[in-house]
Image (spheres, rainbow, N blue to C red):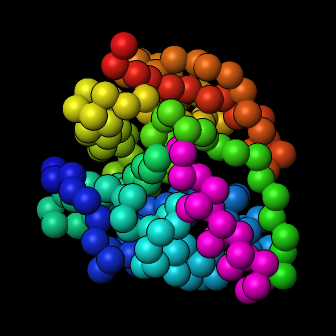
Amino acid sequence: MIIREAQIADAPIIGEHLLIALETIVYQFIGKVDYGEAIAFLQHFIEAKNNQYTYQHCYVAELDHKIVAAAVVYDGAKLDELRNPVFEYIKKQYHLDMQMDPETQAGEFYLDTIAVNRKHQGQGIGTKLLQFIINKYVHQQKQTLGLLVNADNPAAKKLYLRLGFKYVGKRTLLGNVVEHLSMSNE
């Protein structure tokens, strides 16, 4: 397996992967349950620069020259700057005025999304991608890495805790209470 920085040409397949993790949120963003529209929405932002879903903040895992997982990580201090283009687009394109509590903050790099192709789940690919991200941000760059996990995903929470993340509190994300976990090199 190879883990690498994403490229703009990867956008269509990255969109399919990110939608696995972001399905409910993206449907709220576009105001309807429409898989094709949700993919188009994500692809628009993955291909664009300087937003929270851009390929510039994405890593992919390849197996046999095919992308099987993707993760988005960015500096929490830049959340508003990266989120604004998304919310402006939603307002213009879908006539929805999105309001959302902050997912992250200055002082941490934020693992916004990580997803593994459904055919490849349970093979350790997500764990390896997560370990790559932990190594890069926590161990090499000496940063704090944060993420949110849903209470209805105990397997993911168990994995994060096993890898060294610690519970730091609760947050609300589009009306859902989620747990904020973080890891630092201290």
- Residue pictured at 65% horizontal, 43% vertical: 103
Image quadrant occupied by the C terminus: top left
Is residue 123 visible in the rendered structure shown here? no
- Magenta segment boundaries in residue numbering: 76-94
- The number of callouts visible is 0
- Toward the viewer: 169 or 71? 169
Where is residue 9 drawn, in percent x and y?
A: 30, 80
The majority secondary structure of the magenta stretch comes to helix
Where is residue 31 drawn, in percent x and y?
A: 80, 73
**Quadrant in which residue 140 is drawn:** top left
Q: Is residue 60 left or right of residue 155?
A: left
Where is residue 32 drawn, in percent x and y?
A: 78, 75
The verdict on residue 77 being magenta is: yes
Seen as rendered, the residue at the extreme top is 186
Where is residue 125 drawn, in percent x and y?
A: 30, 44
The verdict on residue 45 being magenta is: no
Indicate whether 116 appears above or below 151: below
- Residue pictured at 49% horizontal, 35% vertical: 108
Indicate whether 14 appears above or below 89: above
- Residue pictured at 39% horizontal, 75% vertical: 11
**Quadrant in which residue 179 is drawn:** top right
- Toward the viewer: 152 or 8? 8
Q: Is residue 106 left or right of residue 162?
A: right
**Quadrant in which residue 118 is drawn:** bottom left
Is residue 45 visible in the rendered structure shown here? yes
Q: Is residue 118 left or right of residue 155?
A: left
Q: Is residue 165 left or right of residue 1?
A: right
- Toward the viewer: 67 or 121? 67
- Residue pictured at 55% horizontal, 38% vertical: 106
